[in-house]
Image (cartoon, coloured by chain):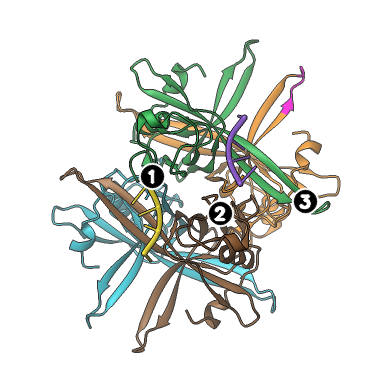
Chain colours: A green, B orange, C cyan, D brown, E yellow, F purple
Amino acid sequence: MAGSVNKVILIGNLGADPEVRHTQDGRPIVNLRLATTDSWRDKNSGERREKTEWHRVVIFSEGLARVAEQYLRKGSKVYVEGALQTRKWEDQSGQERYTTEVVLQGFNSTLTMLDGRQQGGGMSESGGGGDFGRTKPLSGGGSFNKELDDEIPF
Amino acid sequence: MAGSVNKVILIGNLGADPEVRHTQDGRPIVNLRLATTDSWRDKNSGERREKTEWHRVVIFSEGLARVAEQYLRKGSKVYVEGALQTRKWEDQSGQERYTTEVVLQGFNSTLTMLDGRQQGGGMSESGGGGDFGRTKPLSGGGSFNKELDDEIPF
Amino acid sequence: MAGSVNKVILIGNLGADPEVRHTQDGRPIVNLRLATTDSWRDKNSGERREKTEWHRVVIFSEGLARVAEQYLRKGSKVYVEGALQTRKWEDQSGQERYTTEVVLQGFNSTLTMLDGRQQGGGMSESGGGGDFGRTKPLSGGGSFNKELDDEIPF
Amino acid sequence: MAGSVNKVILIGNLGADPEVRHTQDGRPIVNLRLATTDSWRDKNSGERREKTEWHRVVIFSEGLARVAEQYLRKGSKVYVEGALQTRKWEDQSGQERYTTEVVLQGFNSTLTMLDGRQQGGGMSESGGGGDFGRTKPLSGGGSFNKELDDEIPF
DNA sequence: TTTT
DNA sequence: TTTT
């Protein structure tokens, strides 16, 4: 459709280490579980209330995927910019299910680490840190791989 | 959590007239089905490919809900700014299901109509049009009604 | 710096036809004057007040520049996504001046037309219209040309 | 104008402590100098190049201003969401000058601290830290005070 | 003037 | 399952 925009911006922390799968030709695809927490004061009780939202982030952009695999860990705080995508799948009983994800793929996708040092483990052997060893928000390199959705069993 | 952001920005067209439900105390809650379409040229075949993504938008902000009810129709083009929220529900067979929606509620929610005239019907009797008869992006008035999730059967 | 983001999102109308200049090697650079209008009701007087903000948009991305040149006209409504940049220049009297612009350059830049038909003139001969004859938000192609700032007299 | 959006999203570090001024009736207005840094690899030389952009942020929202005054210091990393605004002023020689700022005022303005602890000084006596002692992105409280632009000598 |  |  002419003139459409589909953009998600999240800042949150990883609830687990990145999950990495690979396509048949060896490119990495990374899944993140990202938490954002909203808190507010209840107008009636005056109590402070808090609600955490969990997001599924899927990184198809090769450069961003490699970076996420190397530098992100459980607890990492990241800025993520991608698009909403809902995919259909079948559960064990053959029923249709839908899962909505934030997809980083192609242009206008960004991943930036917001904590200079990793608080999880595993950084030492890989070196780097900070903004993944580069300093610019990492952007998707333009490869559109929508077909991958099909070939990958989530 | 300190320093978290959860923001969705969409520009698209309504696939149907807004669905309006009401809370027990009479406030409207509006559901929109919003389409965004992405198109690209396939790198291998060179063919133009297109993919439409459908989004569920739920408007809890009273002001925005009233405006959506009055002025939006199937086909309307809108700018929407809200937050991602996934809610759990049970299907008929008692199985847990999850639905992810773009929620307009409280601060930092916006709804702006992008077509000066309605292309669906129903605008004439209500007057208005353009940006709903006002010209500023309509913003959520701060009422947080997370409890509503429970009381409303989607 | 690690973890920095610089993003501007505007939806507004062009106050004039795009201005096009060319680099020595023939690439187009396009300047837009874009208006956004905010309106609100004065809390004291109750009167409706309105304020228009004018933005300078500079398009270095070759693809977006060509599209803007071809399809945008005075009055066109556009969605623009770019970055803030302030450049220094000297006025006639040799005094330092600063101008802040929204720059579309490289990744994470987007330009999308939001009115299907041009309301200014000049579209007929160029054909196109809608979302510039393609339907995906046009993104900057990755060419970083910061040096251009210097070679171009604004 | 119907359907306009004016939004700036920045993540960067403060180059100096917040500057605080007060209106005649005692409300604080805070100015921040915020740096965002973009880096890229030069396509010709292959060298890594870096460019820092400095932004003027003005906080009119009373709640956000108090928070910025209390918890932000030189070096603090923040997420800022506001709107672009260019104001005209006269220099000493009576010449018209323009300054573009990111204004946090009213709805759709947000300020979130992204470093849990202050690295500058001055936090100890004020306590707090983290997300300013609350955990939700702080939002402008809805007070539109555009008139302030006039009454304040920057 | 920040940060890495 | 994160974070404060």
Secondary structure predominantly adopted by residues drawn in magenta: loop
Residue type at tag 1? Pro
Magenta segment range?
Answer: B89-94
Q: Where is the N terminus of chain B found, in terms of image quarters?
A: top right
Task: Report, in whole angstroms, how far the alpha carbon at label 3 lies from the one at label 2.
Answer: 20 Å
- Chain letter behind tag 3: A
User: Residue most toward the bottom?
Assistant: D93
Amino acid at the residue labelled 3: Asp
Residue C74 placed where, x, y %? Answer: 38, 63
Please give the residue where the numbered disc 2 appears in the rendered image.
Answer: D112
Near mark 2 (Cα within 10 A), the count class, few <14, some 14-19 or many ≥20, is: many
Q: Position of residue D29 (x, y in %)?
A: 56, 72
Q: Earlier in the sequence, mark 1 or mark 3?
A: 3
Query: Extreme right residue here?
Result: B24
Residue C73 counted in the magenta span: no
Q: Is residue D53 left or right of residue C10?
A: left
Q: Which residue is mark 1?
A: A137
